[in-house]
Amino acid sequence: MALPIGDKQTISSPFIVAYMTESIDPQPTDRVLEIGTGSGYQAAILSPLVTSVYSIEIVPALGRTAQQTLQRLKYQNIYTRIGDGFKGWPEHAPFDKIIVTCSPENIPTPLVEQLKEGGLMVIPVGERYQQTLYLMRKKNGKLVSEALRPTLFVPMTGRAEDGRKIKPDPLNPKTLNGDFEDAPKENKFLPGWYYQRQMSWETDPQAPQGKHYIKFHNETAGLAAHLLQGFAIQGSKIAQLRVSGWFKPENVTSGRNPNEFAGLTISFYDQDRRPLTTVWIGPLQGTKPWHQLEKTFRVPSSAVHGIVRVGLFGGTGTMAVDNVQMKPVNR
C-alpha cells in the first residue's frame, strides 16, 4: 500500500518501486529521467544501477526535502529540480530510460520526444482511479506499448491534470466490474481492480450474479490474497455508504492476530491522503454456502478518497466473492 508523505502525495510500496525499476532494465550506462521525485526513494534505488538520474518534482516542499535528503546521504549522480514533469528536462535529453511515478490521462508528448530511440519508459496511464501501468519502447519515433498491470498512482498534476477530460464523480461512488463479469485481459489481470494477489477468475452459471466470480486462496497466515479498487467520494455531501457483496468461505480461519481476517474493508482518506478510518464486513470464518452481506457505514465529512479491499487479509483458506456494490446515502 502507498503511504502519505505530505502535500497530497504518497510513496509507492517497495514492491511497486522494485517492479518499475526491473521493468526498465537499468544498465550502468543509462541516463534516466524520473518524473515525480517524491521522497527521493525511487531515485535512490536507481542511483547505483545507472550512470545518472534526473528527477523532477512539482511540489516545491517535497522537492527541497528530497534534494536535502539525497545530498545528506551522498548520492552524487542524482540531479533534482522543481518543475512540471509534463515538460520533462529537455536540457539533458535524450534519456535512455524514463520512469514516471504519477499518472497522467495520456502520455505527455515532451516525454516521448525526450526518450532515446530504442529507450524504455514505464508509466501509469488512465483515469483518476482506473489506471494501467505500461512499459513503452520507442521504435521509429513512436511508442510501442505493453500493458503490465492495473495500478493506482497519484495524478500527474500541473499541465497534465489541467487537461484531464475524464474526471471522477465523488457524488456517485461505485465499484467498476464489481460483478466480475468482465474477463481478465491479455496481461491476465481482472479489469477495474489492482494489487491482485492469490486470486482466480471463475465461471459458474450458478454464481449469485451473472456467470463469473472471483476466488481467493491462501495457505500461509499473514500473507494477503486480495484485490483493491479506489474511488472518489465527497464526505461533505455523502453521509453514509451502503456496501454489499456475496461471499462463500471454505475452511477460512483468522491469521496471526485479529487484523488478519477474511472479508471486505473500506478505508477513507482526506484531501492530503491521510487515513481517516477503516470499516469492514467480516470477519468471515469457517465454511458457508453463498450468502449476501450488507452494511451501511458512516462516511467521514472530510473524506475525498476511498479504497475498497476484498479478500483474505492474512487469514487462510478459500473464499469466493461476487457482486460487490456500493450505494451512497446523501446527507
Image (cartoon, rainbow, N blue to C red):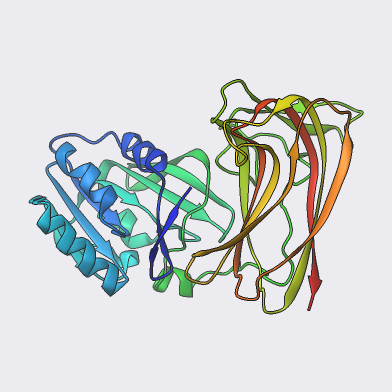
The location of residue 290, given as percent across then percent down, is: 88, 32
Q: Is residue 209 visible?
A: no
Residue 62 as seen in the image, left or right of residue 267 = left
Q: Is residue 314 visible?
A: yes
The location of residue 85, given as percent across then percent down, is: 31, 64
Counting every numbered tag in the picture gives 0
Front one among 270 and 90: 270
Question: Which residue is farthest right?
Answer: 206
Determine the image quadrant of residue 180: top right
Is 161 placed above or below 297 here?
A: below
The location of residue 268, given as percent across then percent down, is: 61, 62
Front one among 256 and 218: 256
Front one among 17 and 118: 17
Please give the name of the residue rendered at 35% of the width and 36% of the height, measured from the top-left corner. Answer: 23
Please give the name of the residue rendered at 32% of the width and 71% of the height, measured from the top-left corner. Answer: 59
The location of residue 168, given as percent across then percent down, is: 63, 67
Is 156 placed above or below 94 here?
A: below
Please give the name of the residue rendered at 28% of the width and 48% of the height, measured from the top-left corner. Answer: 42
Residue 9 as seen in the image, left or right of residue 273 = left
